[in-house]
Amino acid sequence: MPDRRAVPWGRLAVAAAAVGLVVFIVLLGVLNPPRTAGVFTDRLGPEQGDEVADYLARAKDSLNGADDADHWALVSFTEPLVPEQLPPNSGGMRIAQVLYHVAVPRVQTPLVAVPVPAGDAAAISSAESAAWLLPRPTADERSARIVALSAARLRSGCACAVGLVVRGPLDGLRNLASRNGIRAVQALPADAVAGRFAVTPLLPNQMNKILPEPDDGAVPDE
């Protein structure tokens, strides 16, 4: 008659194998932790609350280096430009984006970023695209008037281009930064990924600190 108190060796072996597998998986995780999703924190342009002088210094420092790789860079102007002035103010580098802002005293107007294909013609015609990319008018009468005003001025070819995103080597970006009419050129590291960085231009009227524009002025008819 079998001894019912005999140790169930088969079951113990299965349990030990299971425990060993769990320990192996834990150790594997410790020695080879899973990669976390990339966090993209690259940014071109100043942030709210920045001192303008501090941003200008950061932009200048970003152009230091001896590599010959192409970099994404933000070009900010001393004065808003009409579309025809954009190619001469790109330093001959590829224009990837044109930034528009219709300035109205004491009225908050939207910033519009227009991606453009290669070629001067695309940059020159980008103001029409900017008009189409404005936010859709809301039921708020003031907001609707601001959008309508911005669209009309952009379609008329106003001097409303406040910056460019270009791609080029550091030496070309430094040369561009030294030109008249160029307020700042800020470059990202060479490994920055297109479409994975934020862009906010330094507006020509921002002189001391980056703060929200007041929005208590009257919206003109045209």
Image (tube, rainbow, N blue to C red):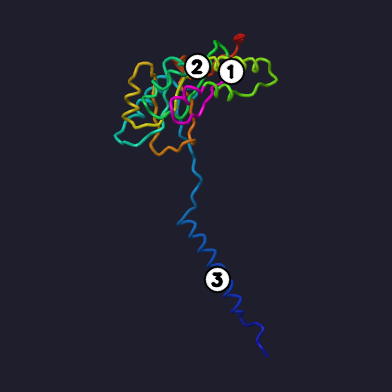
Marked residue nearer the N-terminal end (2 or 1): 1
Furthest-right residue in view?
139
Specify the label residue 17 is tagged with. Answer: 3
Amino acid under disc 1 = Ala
Q: Whole-Å distance between the Cαs marked 2 and 1?
A: 11 Å
Q: Number of marks in the image? A: 3
Q: Residues within 10 Å of mark 3 (few under 14, many from 20)?
A: few
Q: Quadrant of residue 52?
A: top left
Which amino acid type corresponds to the residue marked 3 in the rendered image?
A: Ala
Mark 2 belongs to which amino acid? Cys
Q: Is residue 71 magenta?
A: no
The N terminus - image quarter: bottom right
Q: Quadrant of the C terminus?
A: top right
Q: Which contiguous range is marked in magenta? A: 110-126
**Pointer 2 residue:** 160
- Tell me which label, 3 or 2, sits earlier in the chain: 3
Q: Position of residue 14 (x, y in %)?
A: 58, 73
Between 101 and 186, which is closer to the camera in this rendering?
101
Q: Which mark is residue 151?
A: 1
- Magenta highlight on residue 117: yes
Outermost residue, front side = 121
Seen at 62% across and 83% down, the residue is 6
Name the residue rendered at 46%, 24% in the picture. Answer: 121
* Left or right, 71 with reference to 153: left
How far is mark 1 from mark 3, CA to CA? Answer: 71 Å
Instruction: Please tell me which of labels 1 and 3 falls first in the chain.
Output: 3
Vertical comparison of 4 with 50: above or below: below
Element class at badge 2? loop
- Secondary structure of the residue carrying numbered label 3: helix
Label 1 crowding class (10 Å Cα cut-off): few <14, some 14-19, many 20+? many
Q: Give the x, y percent position of residue 25.
A: 52, 61
Q: Secondary structure at mark 1?
A: helix
